[in-house]
Each structure stands twice: as C-alpha cells, then as structure tokens.
Image (spheres, grey):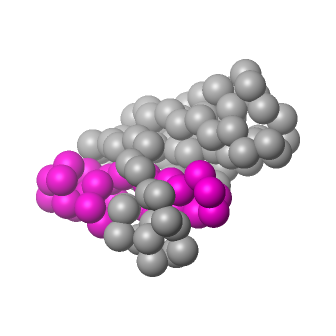
Amino acid sequence: MTLSAYAGWGAIAYSFPEGVGGTSSGLPSLAAAQLHALLKCYMNGGTRCHVKTWERNQCAILARGRHGGVAWSTDNDWYAALGEGIERCYRFDSQCTIIAYACD
C-alpha cells in the first residue's frame, strides 16, 4: 500500500541546541507553512529555530542520529521520504530515528 501526499504546504523547523522542532501541514502558502513551523518550534522550547525543509503536496521527513546529526528528505510517497531521510542520516551518524514529519 502506498501512502501518498495530499494537498497544501508544510514545513519542519528545528533548533539544534535543544533538539526540538515544530511542523506544519495543509497551509495555503509556503510563507504560512514556514512561519507556523517556526512558531511551533519556539513554543516547544527552541531558542534557535530554523526551517530545515518544506514541502508542497508531498511528505517531508526530519531524522536525527545519536550524536545530534540531522537529515531531511521530501517525496510524494511517505515510505520513500522515510527511507531517504533515514539513509541520509546514517551517512554521518548512527541510531537514526524520525523526529518530525509533515505530509500534505
């Protein structure tokens, strides 16, 4: 079964010092998606939040490794985005897990 993206804009913001983030999805513009993700990141305790990735009608994935390395990916297919995000993280870190995602 393929889980595909739907409709709208989404973004993922992340703050390295605290290791927290924020996501958005289903918003009408890229600017709105980025702002919403940043606000959620700050509300989650981030002090240096930055948008790491964004998507339109896709899935975006943010993965973090054991030593704090992060990687992200986007794809029309949830499983493809998931696999690519984890694979990219393992290129420079270990014990990588998905810490955030946004799908539209």
104 to 26, vertically: above or below: above
The picture places residue 63, in percent across and down from the top left corner, at 64, 44
The picture places residue 44, in percent across and down from the top left corner, at 52, 75
Q: Residue at x 52, y 67 (%)?
A: 46
Q: Residue furthest bottom?
A: 43
Does residue 70 show up magenta in the picture?
Answer: no
Where residue 26 sits, quadrant-wise, is: bottom left
Q: Horizontally, is 10 left or right of 69 in the view? A: left
Q: Who is closer to the viewer here, 53 or 56?
A: 53
Q: Residue furthest top?
A: 91
The picture places residue 82, in percent across and down from the top left corner, at 60, 39
Q: Horizontally, is 57 left or right of 88 in the view? A: left
Q: Residue at x 45, y 77 (%)?
A: 43
The picture places residue 85, in percent across and down from the top left corner, at 60, 34
Q: Is residue 38 visible?
A: yes
Q: Who is closer to the viewer here, 53 or 86?
A: 53
> Quick one: quadrant of the N terminus?
top right
103 to 58, vertically: above or below: below
Q: Residue at x 41, y 51 (%)?
A: 50
Q: Residue at x 62, y 57 (%)?
A: 17
Q: Who is closer to the viewer here, 42 or 89?
A: 42
26 to 50, vertically: above or below: below
Q: Horizontally, is 21 left or right of 33 in the view? A: right
Count of marks overlaid on the render: 0
The part of the chain drawn in magenta is 8-36
